[in-house]
Amino acid sequence: MTNLFTPPFYLRNAFTQTLFASNKLGMRRNNPVLTHAQEVILNPIDDVRLQGFYSPQPDGQAKGLVMLLHGWEGSVNSAYILRTGKFLYENGYSVFRLNYRDHGETHHLNPGLFYAILLDEVFGAVQQVAGYESGLPFYVIGFSMGGNFALRIARKCAGQPIPNLSHIFSISPVLDPEKSTYAIDKYRFLQRYFRRNWSRSLLKKQTLYPSLYDFNDVFPLETITGMTEVLLNRYSDYKNPSDYFRKYAVLDDALAALTVPTTIITSQDDPIIPVEDFYDLKLHPSTELIVQRYGGHNGFFEDLSGRVWYRKKIMETLNPIR
């Protein structure tokens, strides 16, 4: 098993690993997951529409289908999504990349705002995509908030199983959203990054639906915490941010009854996700938790070429040596 990750000394800084995870250099060049992508508009529940990109193997001989879930304010074109998608496609897997509502260029598809508590629509999308190649094993890989979605999907499958869902991978998952929000505000460059991206997203939404939204007094706010509080008070039923965060937290025994084999990967030096919460999880025997000393958030780079350790773990699981 290749569970140990020890990067070279020049890649052991948590923020270096974290910044590299978002570096798109070379990710669009000669990437077959983009070359073979087909845009799909899913209708997972009610009148909700979600955009995805399906990249089937051209010869119809895929080893399986993998669905990738990005992090908050990421998209189907986030570097870690394109990096992982390229690797999997080149190894014979079909790939589906999903945008949540209001992520990527999808703000026009739904008048309602994105909230991380909207599990049913993401789960519905997963159910639909699993049917694209229903005779093959299906896998879900989530990063950061996508890792949180992946764990909640695994939990939901206990009552609503997806027949060909074979394994779920959750990389650098958010467990306690309240702590992670405070952590982002603690580090100025992380706060600026998320605040800038979120503000751009909100401006798109306001421009498309001016009769529904006015965020002009939100844009000057300096913290993610402050922006969250104002938006929840104005546009949701949650008047207390803590109540909202608890709704999608994954803590303590939340994963104790999983029925889908699941692998959770995190690092002790993740600047956004406190590692202590992972040690308090009560896990089902079919769930594997891997805590690395290094890796940052969504990082785990082995060298400067862009190779990441977690793809070894993924392939080891998808193609076990018999």
Image (cartoon, rainbow, N blue to C red):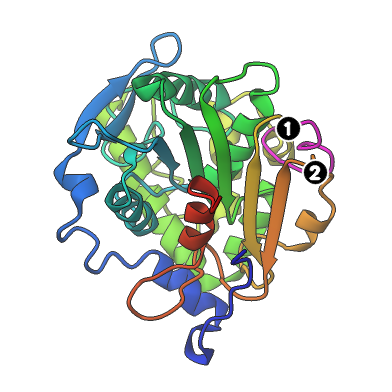
Measured along the vertical axis of the image, is residue 249 above or below residue 32?
above
Occupied quadrant, residue 183: bottom right
Helix, strand or loop at label 1? It is: loop
Q: Does 65 appear in magenta?
A: no
Q: Amino acid at mark 2?
A: Leu
Residue 150: horizontal and vertical position, in percent? 57, 38
The number of numbered discs placed on residues in the rendered structure image is 2
Q: Amino acid at mark 1?
A: Leu
Residue 175: horizontal and vertical position, in percent? 69, 48
Occupied quadrant, residue 118: top right
Instruction: Identify the residue at the far bottom of this view.
Output: 9
Q: Which residue is mark 1?
A: 258
Residue at the (64%, 24%) spot, across then down: 157
Callout 1–callout 2 Cβ contact below 8 Å: yes
Residue extent of the magenta highlight:
247-257
Tell me which secondary structure the magenta stretch mostly adopts: loop
Which comes before the other along the chain, label 1 or label 2?
1
Q: CA distance from mark 1 to mark 2?
A: 8 Å
Residue at the (41%, 20%) spot, across then down: 134
Residue at the (52%, 76%) spot, across then down: 15
Residue 107: horizontal and vertical position, in percent? 31, 32
Residue 243: horizontal and vertical position, in percent? 74, 34
Q: Is residue 26 left or right of residue 236?
A: left
Q: Is residue 124 left or right of residue 38?
A: right
Helix, strand or loop at label 2? It is: loop
Q: Which residue is mark 2?
A: 283
Residue nearest the viewer, comparing 60 with 67: 60
- Residue 270's disc is none
Locate the N terminus by quadrant: bottom right
Q: Is residue 280 left or right of residue 258?
A: right
Measured along the vertical axis of the image, is residue 171 above or below residue 2?
above
Residue nearest the viewer, comparing 158 with 210: 158
